Image (spheres, rainbow, N blue to C red):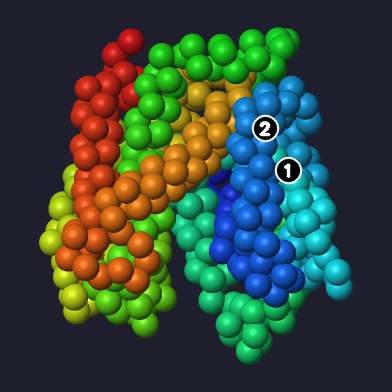
Amino acid sequence: MSVGTVPGGRAWRYGLLGLPLAFAALPIYVHVPHLYAVELGLSLSLVGAILLATRVADALADPLIGWFSDHRASRRRLITLALVPLALGLSGLLMPPDGAGPLWLAGGLVLVSAGYSLATINHAAWGAELGDDDDARTRLVASREGFGLFGVMLASALPGLLAGDLPAGLERLAVVFIVLLGLVALVSLPALPQGHRPPPVAERPWTGLRQALAERPFAMLLGVFAVNGIAAAIPASTVLFFVADVVQREDLSGLFLALYFVAGAVGLPLWVRLARRIGKPLAWLAGMGLAVVVFAWAGRLGVGDAWAFGLICVLSGLALGADLALPAAILADQLARQRSPRAGACFGCWAFVAKASLALAAGLALPVLEALGYSPGLRAPSAVAALAFVYGGLPLLLKLLAAGLLWRWRNILDGREA
């Protein structure tokens, strides 16, 4: 297979679907809580409870969705079916009727979660089955994640560009999403082959999931991915506090986030090239090393260090590229070597760990901040030091732990040792 292609189509056609899927995720996490609490008048506690319940159910369902996908129709057909509830749910959430209340919010979130999980799990598993060799699978994952980063940036910028107030901007964003989703599906899905999908194994759901987790390389990779994911999610949960109360340049928070995501997208092809030269585990280890240096530097910043923090955003964004492209590509290689019939189950577990890492990061970082005496807007030296430790120190320690595990298991993850 030629570089950058898959049989019957190019890698960009596969990756392109990652754009609307990532586009859909951002308003759910960022805009929907504000819309329903501030604009529609639901209580914060009620909105929070609904979000928590649906996210927990969503994460727990992911492994079962993966098992189900392995035993049903083609990946293409499942993704196509998933786009319907995704489009309906997101448009309903962003264009609520007058009097929309908690049941409307909960129903929309259930629809979006079901469609999003079914689509993303099968999209990831399909990428593992499409690539004919290690380099092709890395390029497929990098293409998916690169388009996904572009989708996040697009979704974050459009509401303000489309209208002067948030509700109107979100209504127009929903229309843009439906059009974008339809066009991408027409361009991407029909042009891709089914891939090399092994026949499913007749087994019960929990048996299949246990068998997937019993594979030693997969369990090790999942452990490294979990620790590293928490390390990456802690600064994501606290960055706006850090910008406001440590650097004290809240007016530049949008620019800082843009630098981070753009650097992540630019860095993806660099990590692909490095992985081709030294192997994916060592390239991922290099990304972790860069992140450790960045977190150590971030903990030393203070008031007015905007230029330094901008550079930190660029460097941490480059490290993000390694986290996006390489772990999933390592998993795809493992599945290909084993000719595993459980790609969906494995990526379902993978999605569960990714979502659990986000929840654990917020559940760890925010209570620790409060216990250390920090609250938003409090700029006493002890509070600022606590925030700097949580933003930079905790991720540094967790990254070092993940790097140690990755170094210890690198040959097993790379298939060179049983």
For disc 1, the marked residue is: 114
Q: Position of residue 241 (x, y in %)?
A: 35, 65
Task: Work out whether mark 2 precedes mark 1 in sequence or the reverse, and give the earlier one.
Answer: 2
**Three-letter amino acid code at disc 1?**
Ala
Q: Position of residue 375 (x, y in %)?
A: 35, 62
Indicate the secondary structure of the residue bearing disc 1: helix
**Three-letter amino acid code at disc 2?**
Ala
Can residue 269 be seen here? The reply is no
Indicate the secondary structure of the residue bearing disc 2: helix
Instruction: Look at 44% across and 22% down and name the residue there.
Output: 218
Instruction: Look at 50% across and 24% down and name the residue there.
Output: 335
Furthest residue to the right?
98
For disc 2, the marked residue is: 61
Instruction: Tell me how far mark 2 sits from mark 1, CA to CA.
Output: 9 Å
Query: Are circles 2 and 1 on residues that touch, CB within 8 Å?
Result: yes
Q: Residues within 10 Å of mark 2 (few under 14, many from 20)?
A: some
> Image quadrant of residue 222?
top left
Q: Position of residue 361 (x, y in %)?
A: 41, 44
Instruction: Look at 75% across and 33% down and name the residue there.
Output: 74
Q: Residues within 10 Å of mark 1 (few under 14, many from 20)?
A: many
